[in-house]
Image (tube, grey):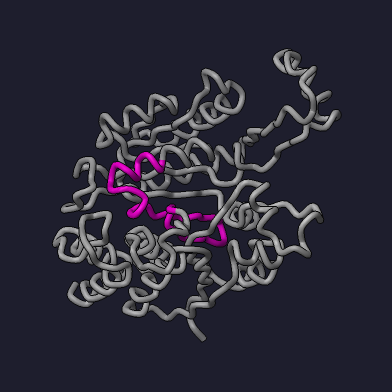
Amino acid sequence: MARYHIAVLPGDGVGKDVMEAAMIVLNNIDIDAEYIYGDVGWEFWKKEGNPLPDRTLELLRETDCCLFGAITSKPPEDAEKELSPELRGKGIKYSSAIVRIRQEFDLYVNMRPCKAFKGNPLNYRDDIDLIVFRENTEGLYAGVEFYPLPDEVRNALLIHEKMKRFQDVPADEIAVTCRIMTKRACERIVRKAFEYAKEYNRKSVTIVEKPNVLRETGGLMIRVAREIAQEYPDIEYRETNVDAMAMWLVKNPQDYDILVASNMFGDIISDLAAQLVGGLGFAASANIGDNYALFEPTHGSAPKYAGKYKVNPMAMLLSVKLMLDWLGEKKWANKLENAIAKVIEEGKVRTYDMGGNNTTLEVAEEVARKIDEI
């Protein structure tokens, strides 16, 4: 029996392309693993009314971790139109498969490294090496939304003085999303960031929030972070507002080490940070809980490029590196990262975004060859 059982969910569009690239590399890495493919994505939404079938959830429960490609997501009206005719009009609502997996398996840490590799023509500058720790299960992505606004929800909200100016807005002209943050979730993500900083000799942890406006939710995060920071006196603790953080990342990205943010802010800041080191083609991520983890590139499914093997696979290959780290296969994780760095530095094999004309799979093959040389 294999030591590791890894779920493989290619998903939609270029998710399938980059997953092929990942398997080229994994087939050149000597770990005792079984890769089990599962169903997820838009085609299953259209055919079954569920982008994350129950059989796929069961597969995840039976595996050690998951390697994920990319999925398509569309607004409710468009999603409804693309359902099979026999499923339309039955009140089936689309919900994000990846968000559900994060919540179902309590993958509360979304870790997104943003590292500039030498020789990448897309780098903003070469000395960037930061990591975003994004809380993954709550905040504005908790999924508690209302439209049209039910009377009982409106009446409950009217206890707040600032809600009274909306009391006469018709139910079908107002939508409400709740930003839900708990002390437990704030504690978990902040502590994980400090523990990572301690283990990997990172010098600073910066909390990215907006407590001057979002006083209760942002305030909770800041209070919790200040308490936890006292337990790590050797690591510099900082706080910044999310809007200022966007400016400082563009101006002085090399000044930052680890950033910690709630769900929405972390999503936005991590994409900005990714662009500083070459864009989403280099943006890997790990979704980590106490008992399970999922690894994925953060780019979308890019339907117009599906099957053309045009997109940059580095984000996926760097996600594989994160998976190997999590599994404890540090030797192979380091060899893979060094191989990626070598291919980027040499600049002989590049996808179109880097000014080259190589395919997704050709880049993966070159990385696989470099692994043998390291």
Q: Position of residue 162 (x, y in %)?
A: 70, 14
Pick whichever, 70 or 334, lies toward us: 70
Q: Is residue 261 above or below residue 201?
A: above
Q: Is residue 320 above or below residue 33?
A: above
- Image spot of residue 230 (x, y percent): 44, 31
Q: Would you identify the image quadrant in which residue 88 lies?
A: bottom right
In the current view of this chain or complex, which residue is farthest to the bottom?
Answer: 1
Residue 322 seen: no
- Give the quadrant of residue 147: top right
Residue 278: where, in percent of width, then height? 28, 48
Tell me what residue is drawn at x 31 percent, y 36 percent.
256
Rendered-image quadrant of the C terminus: bottom left
What range of the chain is rendered magenta? 270-299
Identify the residue at image location x=25%, y=70%: 367
Magenta stretch containing residue 279, yes or no?
A: yes
Q: Give the image quarter of residue 154.
A: top right
Q: Position of residue 20 (x, y in %)?
A: 40, 73
Closer to the camera, 21 or 184? 21
- Is 112 left or right of 89, judged from the image as shown? left
Q: Is residue 315 magenta?
A: no
Residue drawn 36% across and 71% down?
21
- Residue found farthest to the right: 152
